[in-house]
Image: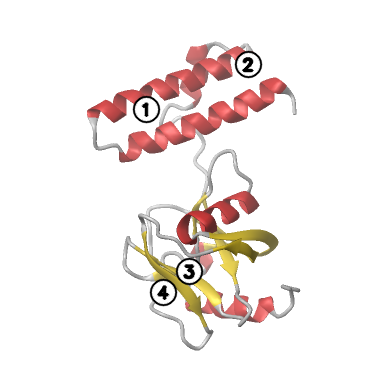
Amino acid sequence: MNPNKEIIILAQRVRALAQNGLTYSLSEYDTERYEELTTISDKLIALSTGVEENIIRECYTPMKEYVTPKVDIRAVVFNEKKEILLVKEKHDGCWSLPGGWADVGYTPKEVAVKEVKEETGLDVEAMKLLAVMDTKCHPHPPIPFYVYKFFILCKITGGTFTSAFDILDKGFFAKDQLPELSLERVLPEQIQRFFQQQEEVYLD
């Protein structure tokens, strides 16, 4: 990879982490540090591209960029008993496929693998894109964002269950024994579709 391009990708990742930090920061001290990271990111991109730093900064000014859908990536993981992996979300106490918003600097496959590891402790390999769905076309509860959902079939390669700060529980479930689902994240009919699709993919 071109060195400048690699620096730009890393700088974009730093800015994304800093922006997320600013969104959720509860401390003035932390806010100052996240703001400093955004400045460092802008400087790195400016040095790598030759574009003035103030122009780089303006590219990220709120409400001046073209608004696009958010991307939610969910990992579809089955065990040897053909049960599906679900996690219990701290946010609403309901269950979902492991996953979350796409991260800057990661491919969809990498996001799926990372989210499974962070939320469950299991190591997986991304195998196949099962579906891309527009939430507008499915009966998800209304949320403020327009969202595309990527569902990626993953194969377990190792690891053991561990705890995560935003996950209350995790486990494998048969298709006729699903717990209460977090409908903002996944629907029962989507889960049933994946049970049907997993028969078509070699998982050994």
Q: Mark 2 points at which residue?
A: 48
Q: Which amino acid does label 2 sit on?
A: Ser
Give the mark nearer the N terminus: 3 vs 4. Answer: 4
Question: Measured from the top left, where is residue 136 in percent x and y?
Answer: 50, 63
- Residue 164, quarter of the rendered image: bottom left
Q: Position of residue 201 (x, y in %)?
A: 74, 74
User: Which comes before the other along the chain, label 3 or label 1?
Assistant: 1
Which one is in front in this view, the residue at disc 1 or the one at disc 4?
Answer: 1
The residue where tag 1 is placed is: 34
Q: What element carries label 3?
A: loop
Which is nearer the N-term, disc 2 or disc 3? 2
Residue 91 to residue 26: above or below: below
Residues at marks 3 and 4, CA–CA distance in whole angstroms: 7 Å
Mark 1 surroundings within 10 Å by alpha-carbon count, few (fewer than 14), some (14 through 19), many (20 or more):
many
Residue name at image x 37 percent, y 36 percent = 21
Q: Which mark is residue 186?
A: 3
**Closer mark to the observer between disc 3 and disc 1:** 1
Circles 1, 4 touching at the beta carbon (< 8 Å): no
Between the C-alphas of marks 1 and 4, the distance is 35 Å
Distance from label 1 to label 2 (Cα)?
21 Å
Contact check, label 2 and label 3, Cβ < 8 Å? no
Instruction: From the top left corner, tell me how far across and down residue 156 is, in percent.
Output: 63, 66
Q: Do the residues labelled 3 and 4 touch (CB within 8 Å)?
A: yes
Q: Relative to residue 136, is residue 4 depicted above or below?
A: above
Query: Which one is in front, 179 or 155?
Result: 155
**Residue shown at 47% from the left, 19% from the top:** 40
Residue 58, can we see it? yes
Instruction: Provide the secondary structure element on which disc 1 rests.
Output: helix
At x 66%, y 27%, the residue is 6
- Residue 181 image label: 4
